[in-house]
């Protein structure tokens, strides 16, 4: 009788372990950059309606580097990045699939009273030459500068494409936001704040999205943008991953990308 009970207990344990492993495998996380996060979450919601049997998660930002590290190590199956892969990262066997072009936006707290800047004025602001919004015809309010860390993908693109940024030295009086969401929150919460990050239409709600040299981020003449891409490790593509990748490149996803102010990229 004891042997029978022991055998039954072992069988139950084995079943639970197998079920747990199967359940863990069915959880598909897409980890990485905060650029285009709301847009990708909307794509994820559309995917979930179509594939209710796949437990998909689009978690908060851990940065492009964090996504690359997670996928390279095998901790996660799919990542999201807002910069091209370095040669050393390609050597990990990572596959890079662009899905959207996202403009890099400058945005301010509404208290500034400024909705348009020249590229020269933008440089003067972030270098600390202009310290009060009244110098630009705005409110008599101190400029509160919010930047990103040097390795941030949006900052790298801004330095490469925004006039004057490649040689610009940031004012020492800047707050460094560690994530896109932190930069947006700072601009929403702090009077006089100016920040930058990937453009999405929800930014227009409660923030001034600034025109640069007369161009809105969605205008053809706007100079700065990032490419949002999915990454995975070569040889690991399974049915769940392929289903999400295919959906992210579908007509439905392209419509969502456009609705958020991005430009779909076809592979």
Image (cartoon, rainbow, N blue to C red):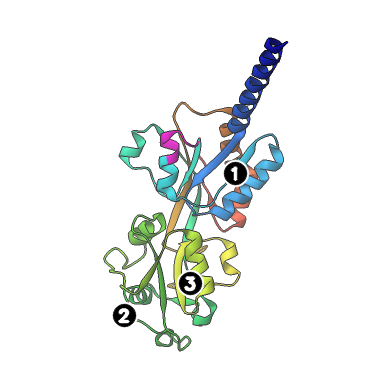
In space, the residues marked 3 and 1 are separated at their CA atoms by 34 Å
With 128 as the anchor, is 214 left or right in this view?
right
| Front-most of residues 114 and 71 | 71
Is 217 rendered above or below residue 5?
below
Residue 233, by quadrant, is: top left
Residue at x-position 35% and y-position 54%: 151
Numbered marks: total: 3
Q: Which residues are magenta?
A: 70-76
Residue at image mark 2: 129
Residue at image mark 1: 57
Residue at image mark 3: 211
Crowding near the residue tagged with mark 3, few <14, some 14–19, many ≥20 C-alpha atoms within 10 Å: many
- As helix, strand or loop, the secondary structure at mark 1 comes to strand
Crowding near the residue tagged with mark 1, few <14, some 14–19, many ≥20 C-alpha atoms within 10 Å: some
In space, the residues marked 2 and 1 are separated at their CA atoms by 43 Å
Residue at x-position 42% and y-position 59%: 178
Q: Position of residue 94 (x, y in %)?
A: 41, 35
Q: Which of the two discs, 3 and 2, sits closer to the camera?
A: 2
For the residues labelled 3 and 1, say whether their Cβ atoms are less than 8 Å apart.
no
């Amino acid at each position: 009788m004891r042997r029978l009970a022991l055998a039954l207990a072992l069988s139950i344990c084995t079943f639970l372990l197998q079920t747990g492993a199967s359940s863990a495998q069915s959880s598909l996380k897409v980890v990485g950059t905060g650029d285009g996060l709301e847009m990708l979450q909307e794509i994820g919601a559309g995917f979930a309606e179509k594939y209710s049997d796949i437990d998909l998660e689009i978690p908060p930002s851990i940065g492009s580097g964090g996504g690359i590290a997670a996928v390279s190590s095998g901790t996660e199956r799919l990542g999201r990045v807002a910069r091209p892969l370095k040669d050393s990262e390609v050597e990990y066997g990572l596959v890079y699939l662009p899905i959207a072009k996202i403009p890099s936006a400058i945005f301010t707290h509404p208290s500034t009273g400024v909705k348009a800047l020249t590229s020269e004025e933008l440089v003067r602001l972030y270098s600390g030459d202009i310290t009060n919004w009244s110098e630009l015809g705005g409110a008599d309010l101190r400029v509160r500068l919010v930047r990103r860390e040097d390795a941030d993908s949006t900052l790298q693109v801004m330095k490469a494409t925004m006039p004057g940024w490649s040689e610009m030295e940031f004012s020492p009086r800047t707050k460094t936001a560690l994530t896109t969401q932190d930069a947006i929150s700072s601009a929403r919460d702090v009077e006089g704040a100016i920040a930058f990050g990937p453009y999405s239409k929800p930014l227009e709600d409660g923030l001034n999205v600034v025109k640069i040299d007369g161009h809105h981020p969605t205008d053809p003449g706007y100079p700065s943008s990032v490419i949002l891409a999915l990454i995975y490790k070569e040889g690991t593509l399974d049915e769940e991953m392929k289903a999400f990748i295919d959906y992210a490149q579908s007509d439905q996803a392209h419509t969502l990308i456009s609705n958020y102010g991005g430009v779909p990229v076809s592979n």
